[in-house]
Image: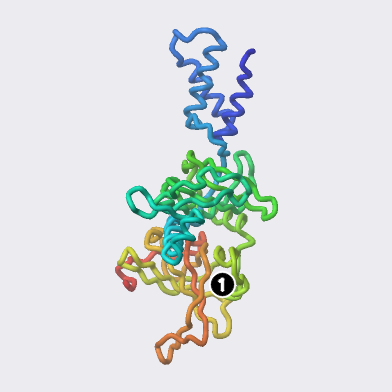
Amino acid sequence: MPIDIQARLQSIATKSGKPIAEVQNTFNTTLASLPPNISGEQTRAKYALKIVNRDLTGGSKSNAAAFEGVIVGADDPRDIMEGVRKSAIAEYQKNPELALSSGSVKMGDDGQLQVLDNRQTFPDGKPNPNFGKPRPDKFFVRNLRVAVRKPGEQEWKAGKLNLRGDQAQIPIVFGKLVSFRALGDLDVTSGEFDLRSASVTSFEVKQELPSEEVMRIIDTAFAKYYKELGKCQAYHESLGEGPAFYNRLVVTEGTVSYIKYANDPTKSHMIILKDDSLVGDQDAVQVWVPNKLKSQINFGVGSIISIIGRTRTGPGWDREKQQQDTTVTRLSLEAQSIFGRPGLVNIVEDSSSAEII
C-alpha cells in the first residue's frame, strides 16, 4: 500500500509541535539528500519520513504531546523519597513485625533495611508495576507554573507542569517562549493545563519575548490568581487546610521601597513592597527572593513590579520595642519569579550601594 506522506508529515508535526510547513521543508531536504543506493520513490519516502521523525521528535515512542509555554514560576526540586523513607523507618522502629507484614519494608540480604513500594494501585486505579519492589534512594519532583497553549492556538491558559525524576533537574528558562513535550492535557473543570513530564521533556527556546508581551501573557493566563497586595493576607487566611493552602499561588504587584541583598547563597534577597491597597495598620510586605533568582532583580527602588509566588504569614513587628509581636500576624511572599512592569521601573541599583545581609 502506498505511503500517505501527508498524513505521516501531519503526525510528525503534531508530535513535535512544529508547523507543518517546517516539517514539509525538512522532509523535502531529507529526501533530496538520501544516498543514491536507496532507490524507488516509496522506499526513499519511507526512509526520509523515518529520518524526519527522528530529527524532529527524537524518534521517541512517548505519548507526550507538544505544547508552547512561558515559564513564570518554579519550586526547587524536592526529594519525595526523603519523607517516604523516614516514615517507613519510623514505622519499623515502632513495630518491626507490622512494618514487615505490611510490605512497606524488608530486610535485605546485606542486612540493611529496604523501603518497598507497597501501593498495589495508583490513585487512578491502575495497577502499580513497582508494587513490592524497593523504592529508589532518591526521586526528585519539581512543580513549574507555566502559561500554556497548544501549537497553533492563540489563547494562553494557566498551567502546572510537574517535573519528575531526571526531568526535575533540566534547565528552566523564565519569561521566554519555549516549546516542550509533556503528558496530560487541559483540565476542563479548572480550565487549566495539568501536565507532567515525560522522558522526552525539555525546553527549547523558540523566541525572546518583549517584556510587554511577557506581562500581557501573565496578566491574561493567571488573571484569577491576581490579588491586590492589601488583599493577600485575607486570601491566605481564607484558604484553610489541604491542597489549596499548600499551593496558595498568588500574583500581585507593588512599589519597591527597599532592597536588601544576601551575600550568602543559602539565603534569600529581601524586597519591601508598598501599595495603595495596604490600608490602616497593614505593614509593607516583605518579598523573599531565592538567591538563584537574583538576576531577576533588574530594577531599583521606586519601581512597580509583579510577583508570582506563595503567601505566608508570621509574627508581626513592634516598631517601638524593636521586637516580634506574636499577637498579630504579618504577611510575606515567597517569590517564584518577579517582573518589572514595563515603563514603570527605575534603574537597577548597584548591589554595593544596597544593604547586604
Task: Identify the image's colour scheme: rainbow, by chain, secondary structure or one colour.
Answer: rainbow
Q: Secondary structure at mark 1?
A: helix
Instruction: Please name whichever residue, 133 or 326, is drawn nearer the observer in this view of the structure.
Output: 133
Q: Quadrant of the C terminus?
A: bottom left
Q: Tell me: residue 142, above or below residue 255.
A: above
- Observer-nearest residue: 347 or 127? 127
Which residue is pictured at 42% across the width and 53% down the height?
A: 106
Q: Residue at x 50, y 48 (%)?
A: 209
Q: Which part of the image, by quadrant, shows the N terminus?
A: top right
How far from the left and from the top, in percent, is residue 7?
Answer: 63, 24
Q: Which residue is mark 1?
A: 229
Residue at the extreme bottom? 320
Please indicate whether residue 326 sits to the left or right of residue 350 in the image: right
- Residue furthest to the front: 97
* Identity, as a three-letter code, of the amino acid under mark 1: Leu
In the picture, measured across the screen, residue 248 lies left or right of residue 90, that is: right
Label 1, residues with CA under 10 Å away: few <14, some 14-19, many ≥20: many
Position of residue 180 measured from the top left corner of the image (x, y, whole percent)? 52, 42
**How many badges with numbers are in the image?**
1
Expressed as whole percent of the image width and height from the top left, the position of residue 347 reads 41, 64
At horizontal 43% and vertical 68% (from top left) the residue drawn is: 288
Residue plotted at (60% across, 29% down): 11
